[in-house]
Image (spheres, grey):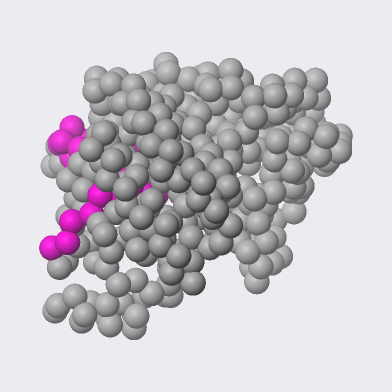
Amino acid sequence: MNTTDYINLSEKVLTPNYGPRETIMVRGEKEFIWDSEGNKYLDFLSGIAVVNLGHCHPKVTEAICKQAQLLPHCSNYFLVQSQIELASLLCEHSFAGKAFFCNSGAEANEAAIKIARRYSVLTTNRTDRFEIITMKNSFHGRTIATASATGQEKIQKTFEPLLEGFRYATYNDIKSVESLVSDKTCAIMLEPIQGEGGVIPATKEFMIQLRELCDRKKILLIFDEVQCGMGRSGKLFAHEHFGVTPDIMSLAKALANGFPIGAMLSRTEIGEVLTKGSHGTTFGGNPMACAAGVAVMKAIYDEDILQNATEKSDYLRDGLSKSLSGNKHVSQITGIGMILGIHLDKTGFGIVHDCAKHGLIINCTANTVIRLLPPLIATFEDCDYAIEMITKAINTESNFE
Ligand SMILES: *Cc1c(COP(=O)(O)O)cnc(C)c1O
């Protein structure tokens, strides 16, 4: 079968939820990816913030291969060394005392929602204290619970009835959060940097006020770091930029650099409420996923990944600011570290398409925001190429038609 045959067959046998796609990707190496026609691309999307260390990172690949030959799966009736090691590394490098593993971001948030409710019931003896305040324009996943937590109508429409118990506040507006807090509130959940919502970082003031509010009302603070965690922001976890720690944090995407995994981390006392039989998942903490995760954690520190992310982010941002300054379509560049958003006055899909034609993969979110999620190993040369291509594409008026 050739490329066209595959595309035609895909339309026949796959659900159309990702829209029509014209490119089949077949191979990746570091920051590059190749399609079935042999075209090479600079991947400044990193599989949507997943392959932070670049494609086929040798240490991660080695860990997966080794584990695949030893014991790919065994169930959580037994302990798995790599699961214990990964939990230990994550706790050592964060506020957390306990880790629960699952297989995706939605599941990590699902676990965060469940543990917040259970903690509330077990510590207050009340069953009516289950509300969670989330933010408008947030994104927490596509399961019914996490779609309900997501403050975006387009994610929820036609899937009702939603799960009850979510209230939506305005991001970076403490008054809006305060107005929704009641004696039914058990948690507040947000992304330290909104990703799908248009690359909007929280303000430091908002984060500090949230922490203070939560402490005062004995409400749990949950950070969804599925997209902005694991070095994406230039620090291991994005909340480190604000000097504010959560009680619970969800991780997924880049945690195993492409191998499916999710994690819900919490303070020890909160983690303790997931007593025997209260929660679980068959694949959670899978030996291969955790071996990959351990390799990722080691590589982040052994290979100075955070330093590189910060250095290249500054370079990329400065370069884009200069080359796009004065462009009437660009209002601002937002983000922290290697999650950057170029805010346009029109839809950015034409720009994304034009860049792909010229060998650069980026994406457009919230309709009008060009989102850059470069691998954290990107070089100055990669940044120069991206700046040149993006600037050319935004300067081409026909890309907005
Ligand atoms: C991607 C994402 C999720 C959902 O993760 P899945 O692995 O797709 O279920 C949740 N929260 C945030 C912030 C995300 O970016």
Residue name at image x 65 percent, y 29 percent: 203
Please report the residue visible at 45 percent of the width from the left and 65 percent of the height from the top. Answer: 397
Give residue 8's position: percent from left, percent from top: 28, 82
Looking at the image, residue 311 sits to the left or right of residue 239; the answer is left
Q: Is residue 285 above or below residue 106?
A: above
Does the magenta-highlighted stretch encompass residue 55? yes
Q: Quadrant of the N terminus?
A: bottom left
Classify residue 257 as left or right of residue 364: left
Residue 367 highlighted magenta (yes or no) = no
Viewer-closest of 215 and 124: 215
Q: Is residue 86 left or right of residue 213?
A: left
For residue 154, which quarter of the picture?
bottom right
Q: Position of residue 245 (x, y in %)?
A: 59, 21
Q: Is residue 38 above or below residue 72?
A: below
Q: Is residue 255 above or below residue 281?
A: above
Residue 77 visible here: no
Q: Residue at x 14, y 77 (%)?
A: 2
Closer to us: 401 or 157: 401
Residue 367, position in %: x, y?
55, 60
Q: How many marks?
A: 0
Looking at the image, which residue sits at the far front?
A: 326
Task: Judge whether 38 appears above or below 138 on screen.
Answer: below
Which residue is more in the foreground, 96 or 356? 356
Residue 186 placed where, x, y %? 75, 35
Q: Is residue 172 visible?
A: yes
Residues in magenta?
38-64
Which of 153 and 386 lies nearest the eye of the viewer? 386
